Amino acid sequence: MADDSLTGEALFNDPYPVYARLRREAPVALFEGTHEYFVTRWQDCQTVGANDAVFGPSASDNRPEARVFGIPNVLSMSGPEHQALRAGIDYEVQQQRVDGYIEDLARPIVVKYIDAIRSQGEADLTQQLFEPISVRIVGDLIGLTQIPNETLQSWFHAINGGLQNTVAQDPAVWARCDQAIADIDEVMRAMYEKVCAAPDATLFSHVVYGGLPDGQRRSFEDIMPTMRVIILGGLQEPGHGAANAAYGVLDDKEQSGLMRTEPSTWALKAYDEGLRWIAPIGVTPRVARQDFEIAGTRVPEGASVAIVLASANRDEGRWENAEAFDMRRKKKANATFGYRPHFCSGHYLSRAAGRIALEEAFARLPGLRIDADKPVNVKGWRFRGVVNLPARWDA
């Protein structure tokens, strides 16, 4: 039976029973493990997310994000400085730009990795397909074209481990996280020197120069906390979004049939539903700038607040049969990409890459199905995904 107690272990193993209980009994609850108030109902999350004047971004050194990413970063900033940095980040991932390059960038990568496993008749779709596709697409866009997939995957797994280590405080997990950060900094310092000498079209170069007056650039120290955010969220989210969606589809006979028959029709619907069903990024942090009462709970000034996106996405008051994956649902906005002004910059790129990955996987791997002899592994709560998705197909 699922554990619905508010503990770090229960959240990591499966947070959804915990969130369901909180929505019923304590929709705003203090989680002692991370010293933050969890806001779990859809409408309350909307209230907090839309009220940037009261619930601003958290720049506290006590936050796990500060320990892992560094402060300030794009998630902790506000005002004109944040707007200028977002201008640099957003340029290459805005819809018009993505529409212009996504087919030439993404589809050859997707086809390459599918062709590499197709004759095998079986594979771990997360580890051998969706994660490699995701890190290659986004890694190339960032400018990490010479860094192998295995390294990129190890980076975001190590950073992710650090963010989820704030309760257990496992020294080995911190050691891997710190080593990954050091390796990232070493690689990106060389990239920084290169774009300082000659700006280029990479997302990294746009972060260095974007949103600033001509002739100015950000320092290496200024941009690296934000680049760590981009590396974790950007490299991970499209892959885990696709894996989550594929698991939902493959676990349902009728939806599997629809996807196999018309992958181009259903791929984006499946990806969007997967983002709702298992949000790859489960929470987004805020800090209360003044005392505030919500859902009968007083949140004191200075308190850390976690908008639990994953819980909002399964609120029974907003979605019928909210716990189930159903790509046939009537389209309705979910909370996965957060709230403005911190709405995820890469949302359109993520959806475009995920659509192509799912479309090609179901089109090119006939009879795609879950391998019933091997376990599917889903874990995490700050970042959650289907980390192992064993599958078979008719080779």
Image: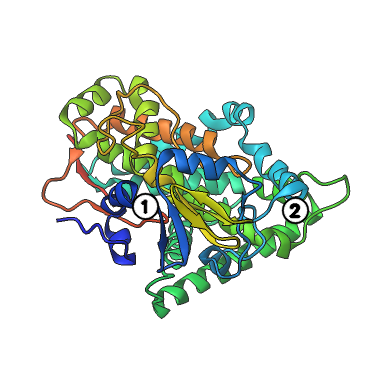
Residue 279 in sight in this render: no
Q: Residue at x 33, y 43 (%)?
A: 243
The part of the image, by quadrant, that contains residue 263 is top left
What's the amino acid at mark 2?
Answer: Val
Give the crowd class for mark 2: few <14, some 14-19, many >=20 residues within 10 Å.
Answer: some
The residue at the point 42 percent across, 80 percent down is: 171
Looking at the image, what colour scheme do you see? Answer: rainbow
Give the residue drawn at x 48%, y 31%. Answer: 352
Q: Position of residue 103 (x, y in %)?
A: 51, 28
Tell which circle, 1 or 2, labels the residue nearer the N-terminal end.
Answer: 2
Q: Check disc 1 and report the residue beneath it.
A: 384
What distance separates the C-alpha of mark 1 from that of mark 2? 34 Å
The single residue placed furthest to the left in the displayed view is 373
Q: Quadrant of residue 276?
A: top left
Residue 379: x and y in percent read 30, 56
Look at the picture and state if 162 lies above or below 239. Answer: below
Q: Is residue 222 left or right of residue 118?
A: right
When the figure is inspected, residue 109 is found, relative to residue 103, above or below; the finding is: below
Q: Nearer the viewer, mark 1 or mark 2?
A: 1
Residue type, numbered disc 1? Arg
Disc 1 secondary structure class:
loop
Along the horizontal axis of the image, is 64 left or right of 373?
right
Q: Nearer the viewer, residue 322 or 255?
A: 322
